[in-house]
């Protein structure tokens, strides 16, 4: 049995070579679980780390009953790690936070109430603790993405988000698509998202895994990939059937 089904919220934490941050993750996430607004668990996704991250995850999962992990055989990237988290989560809600802890897990409780009326709630980083050049890259990339997708999203790079699990499982995931969650959500009939200001903190340990190439240049190419995929996205609503019970709607990306 998938043990995440026993919870209301599964917090997905993708990580790659974060050995030095494992202790901080344990402290911050276990503290959040003690008073979260709903019963929650943590699902780490080890993205083929080559340092001691996996051993560290096994250690903290062994002494925290609400901590779970899956580990890739090789590095596959953030989009793949998030897809695996969505695939494995069986709770009603899923959340996402980066292992660098530049966003605060305590602020999941700010986002979660919006899921009563929305399918996704996403953070907007205020007073960002990044270099001026990194902030410029982010503003430029977000502006270009909004123009290309029409999603209206302010800060898709913010690593603090919550979703209705059913909506997250519908996302057509490809490499780089983690930057397009609002746009992907809007492909679903009637789906809506809410943006909420959250705090942003400096990285304490480790180094960023993103360079100017995969932060900006790759995201530009992904915008064109999204536009191509949007035209081929399949939507249908069943009007009548004698098969049996069901919600009567479904959608998927064309193979």
Image (cartoon, rainbow, N blue to C red):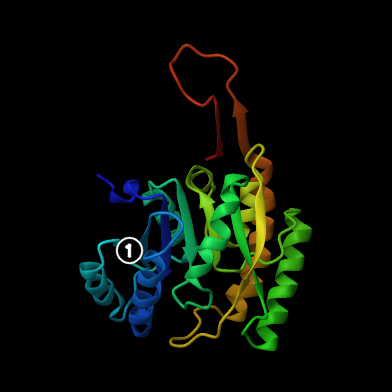
Horizontal placement of 133 versus 175: left or right? right
Q: Position of residue 190 (x, y in %)?
A: 67, 38
Q: Residue at x 67, y 49 (%)?
A: 228
Q: Residue at x 47, y 11 (%)?
A: 242
Horizontal placement of 214 versus 142: left or right? left
Q: Quadrant of the N terminus?
A: top left
Picture layout, residue 69 above or below residue 183: below
Residue 1 seen in render: yes
Horizontal placement of 97 versus 192: left or right? left
Q: Residue at x 52, y 40 (%)?
A: 255
Name the residue nearer the viewer: 108 or 175. Answer: 108
User: In which quadrant of the rendered view does residue 138 lie?
Assistant: bottom right
Picture layout, residue 30 above or below residue 188: below
Q: Secondary structure at mark 1?
A: loop
Q: Which residue is mark 1?
A: 72
Picture layout, residue 26 above or below residue 202: above
């Amino acid at each position: 049995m998938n043990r995440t089904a026993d919870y209301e919220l599964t917090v997905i934490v993708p990580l790659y070579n974060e050995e030095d941050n494992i202790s901080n993750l344990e402290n911050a996430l276990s503290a959040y679980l003690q008073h979260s607004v709903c019963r929650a668990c943590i699902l780490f996704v080890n993205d083929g780390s080559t340092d001691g991250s996996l051993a560290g995850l096994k250690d903290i999962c062994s002494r925290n009953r609400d901590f779970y992990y899956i580990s890739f055989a090789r590095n596959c990237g953030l989009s793949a790690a998030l897809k695996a988290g969505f695939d494995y989560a069986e709770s009603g809600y899923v959340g996402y936070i980066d292992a660098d802890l530049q966003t605060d897990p305590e602020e999941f409780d700010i986002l979660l109430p919006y899921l009563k009326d929305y399918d996704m709630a996403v953070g907007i980083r205020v007073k960002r603790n990044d270099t001026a050049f990194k902030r410029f890259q982010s503003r430029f990339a977000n502006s270009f993405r909004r123009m290309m997708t029409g999603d209206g999203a302010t800060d898709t790079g913010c690593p603090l988000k919550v979703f209705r699990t059913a909506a997250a499982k519908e996302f057509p995931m490809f490499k780089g698509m983690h930057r397009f969650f609002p746009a992907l959500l809007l492909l679903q009939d009637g789906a809506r998202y809410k943006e909420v200001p959250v705090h942003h903190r400096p990285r304490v340990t480790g180094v960023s895994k993103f360079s100017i190439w995969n932060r900006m240049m790759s995201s530009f190419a992904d915008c064109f990939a999204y536009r191509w995929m949007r035209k081929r996205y399949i939507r249908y609503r069943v009007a009548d059937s004698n098969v049996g019970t069901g919600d009567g709607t479904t959608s998927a990306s064309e193979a």
